[in-house]
Image (tube, rainbow, N blue to C red):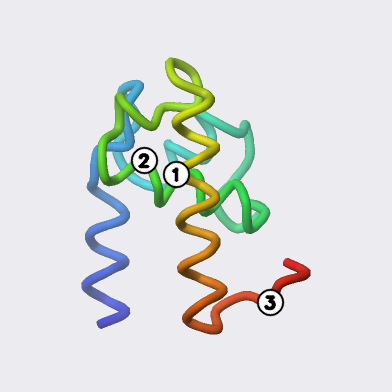
């Protein structure tokens, strides 16, 4: 499973001409994927559903709502705590 998700995240379109998580991290947050905060990572994962509609550049309100949804799902599935 881990190899499949790694391959997927390294090739998927995050919008704004950012293909792959490494490029998306640099494009949207000017940092490497290993340095992302939980909210930043959730923002990038949220982009996968609809890269233009959830773009933090083009539609920041949509992006925040989607990020919050992703973080709620992460919490509900015990990947993060309420504090995070």
User: In terms of image quadrants, where is residue 4?
Assistant: bottom left
Question: How far separated are the C-alphas under marks 3 and 1?
Answer: 18 Å
Q: From the viewer's perspective, is 51 left or right of 78?
A: left
Picture coordinates of residue 76, whole percent (x, y): 51, 77
* 23, above or below 16, in the image: below
Q: Residue at x 23, y 59 (%)?
A: 8
User: In terms of image quadrants, where is residue 37?
Assistant: bottom right
The residue at which mark 2 appears reads as 47
Query: Which of the pair 48/75 is nearer the observer?
Result: 75
Q: Residue at x 62, y 51 (%)?
A: 39
Question: How far separated are the C-alphas under marks 2 and 3?
Answer: 22 Å
Q: From the viewer's perspective, is 21 left or right of 19?
A: right
Which circle's residue, 1 or 2, is located before the other in the chain? 2
User: In terms of image quadrants, where is residue 18?
Assistant: top left
Contact between marks 2 and 3 (CB within 8 A): the answer is no
* 80, above or below 36, in the image: below
Picture coordinates of residue 62, whole percent (x, y): 45, 30
Secondary structure under the numbered disc 3 in the rendered image: loop
Picture coordinates of residue 75, whole percent (x, y): 56, 74
In the drawing, what numbered circle is on residue 66? 1
Picture coordinates of residue 31, whole percent (x, y): 63, 40
The residue at which mark 3 appears reads as 81
Q: Residues within 10 Å of mark 1 (few under 14, many from 20)?
A: many
Contact between marks 1 and 2 (CB within 8 A): the answer is yes
Secondary structure under the numbered disc 1 in the rendered image: helix
Q: Residue at x 61, y 34 (%)?
A: 29
Secondary structure under the numbered disc 2 in the rendered image: helix
Question: How far separated are the C-alphas under marks 1 and 2?
Answer: 8 Å
Q: Quadrant of the N terminus?
A: bottom left
């Amino acid at each position: 499973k881990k190899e499949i998700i790694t391959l997927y995240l390294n090739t998927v379109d995050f919008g704004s001409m950012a293909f792959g998580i490494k490029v998306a991290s640099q494009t949207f947050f000017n940092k490497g994927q290993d340095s992302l905060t939980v909210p930043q990572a959730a923002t990038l994962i949220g982009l996968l559903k609809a890269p233009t509609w959830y773009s933090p550049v083009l539609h920041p309100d949509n992006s925040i709502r989607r990020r919050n949804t992703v973080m709620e799902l992460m919490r509900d599935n015990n990947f993060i705590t309420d504090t995070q």
